[in-house]
Amino acid sequence: MMPFSVTASAGAAIGTEAWITTDGSNQLIPDISGDRIVWQDDRNGNFDIYMYDLSTGKETQVTTDESDQMSPKISGDRIVWTDYRGGVENLDIYMYDIPAGRETQITTDTSVQWKPAISGDHIVWVDFSEDHRTAIYMYDISTGTETQIATDGMQPDNPAISEDRIVWEDHRNWEGGIEGNADIYMYDVSTGKEVQITTDELHQREPAISGNYIAWLDYRNEGELDVYMYDLSTGEEIQITGNDSEQFNVDISGNYFVYDDVRDPMNRDVYLYDISKGEETRITTHEAYQADVAISGNVIVWEDMRNGAMRVDGYPFENSDIYTFTLDSADLSLTDNKNTNPEENNVDKENSKKSIEDIISAIFSNILHKLPFYTVSSSEPAAAEESGTGPFEEAEVVPDEEPADEGFMKEVAVEEAEVVPGEEYPPEDLPEQGAIANPVHEAELPAEEVHEEYAARGPGEYLMRQGDILKLPGDYELLVKLIDEKSKMVWLEFEKNGDFVDDEILSLPAEETIWDLYSYPVDGDEELIYRVRLKDVSGDKEIVFYIEFM
């Protein structure tokens, strides 16, 4: 590794930034525990899990199955992820034991399990039951037992865990409408007690937890995402950010809170907040896009686009790398418990209560459509060393003209399709329909508000939210069933006159961003009639996609 030193300006933090991956493909959604960093990597044509050890400079490929393995989380010697080898209708949670070199399938149910998090012996995830509702489950590695934590009637999502405490966003108090009301709840495994953490009438989402601190993304300030926290030891709620921009992907380690920030509208940066000092520090200053931040102890990790580009054919970023920033002034007395197994910690139980666990990062790239198109100049990064790291040799990124109006998309009048908003969380009487049926109904919203919010963005380009229905010519409809901002995935369903035709999961960045839709013939052969291309999966459960009318 050949790190370079930088000084973050906002809070006078001094530390060392290091470029971890130099492969020309995408390395995304990193997580960190102690000296180990994990991420999903598409260098082999599918997403695999890779790991890098900061202490040895060694990179290791963890998974080799030809299907996708995504959204890794790490705690000490264990890595968990969402695995696609059973197909998109049967996602499972897998675990890898680093010292043993052993992979284990954790879930075997034929429905969908995804969004895992891990702390010590406990793994949590989101589970789709047979009636297509969500629940939170926990698996105890030491006993081999599985327990349901949050029931499916609450539509829980995005769990995170720290030792015996599990947090998630919960929709039991949701009464409909665009704003909705997601709250943060906590369950203590040791006591069996559930506690409601937030009571504000607007959304609180994507929680993280470390010891006594819980953080989340909050919509209460005119819909702008801010970071809030709750101290379990004092019962005090504190607003961390309050500027005019939005924050995403909050994580915690000891007194340190990290998050992505878009106060510069043309890129996204990593910021740190020290709760003990009440100080915010800007960690990244490069003009490129930095996001999906995580922290363990005094090391911050994120995905970085300074060596990459947005492809001129309209696809999203390519060549995203993993970077780290090591704080020189870290309070190392606060041990991060996700670095080791509990019995290996050199701190007592009281100190371990103040330590860090694996946190699910949150809301994704809602600014892709704001960015200019970029191409990378001929000054390419130096080849990676055997360890998997590379020297800091910054590629020059220059703005390019927008691509010519030709190629994939045809010119299509906006009037040919209509977006109908739907409830984000469907009613309980769910019909059996399709492999991942999760039917929605029209929300009773003012028409003028609906059309302004959900109008087509250009020829064949649409912005839709989870639960929306796109009415297409020929009595066809495209339904947005489920959006996972963290993994940049969306479930879509294709229907004709209310009858199921097909469904698919699309993800970014991957080859599966294109989905061909065929007719629903009474007799005769199927005919290609529409082509869907996913462009962006962003925050607040929104997607941007193109439709080509064949």
Image: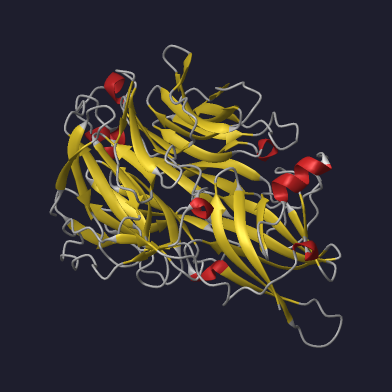
Q: Is residue 147 visible?
A: no
Q: Whole-percent x and y of residue 466?
A: 67, 49
Q: Whole-percent x and y of residue 115?
A: 50, 48
Location of residue 7 (image quadrant)? top left
Q: Taking 30 as reference, is 514 above or below it?
A: below
Q: Taking 463 as reference, is 285 above or below it?
A: above
Residue placed furthest toward the bottom: 524
Q: Residue at coordinates 71% horizontally, 62% vertically from top-left?
A: 493
483 or 150, which is in the foreground? 483
Q: Taking 40 as reference, is 452 above or below it?
A: above
Location of residue 253 (image quadrant)? top left
Q: Whole-percent x and y of residue 313?
A: 50, 71
Picture mark count: 0
Position of the N terminus by quadrant: bottom left
299 or 400, which is in the foreground? 400
Q: Is residue 1 visible?
A: yes
Q: Residue at coordinates 75% horizontally, 67% vertically from top-left?
A: 413
65 or 294, which is in the foreground? 294
**Is 103 on the left-hand or right-hand side of 173?**
left
**Is 334 on the left-hand or right-hand side of 439?**
left
Position of the C terminus by quadrant: bottom right
Residue placed furthest toward the top: 234
**Is 503 on the left-hand or right-hand side of 441?**
left
Q: What coloring was used for the rendering?
A: secondary structure
Q: Whole-percent x and y of residue 160?
A: 46, 37
Q: Residue at coordinates 44% horizontally, 18% vertically from top-left?
A: 232
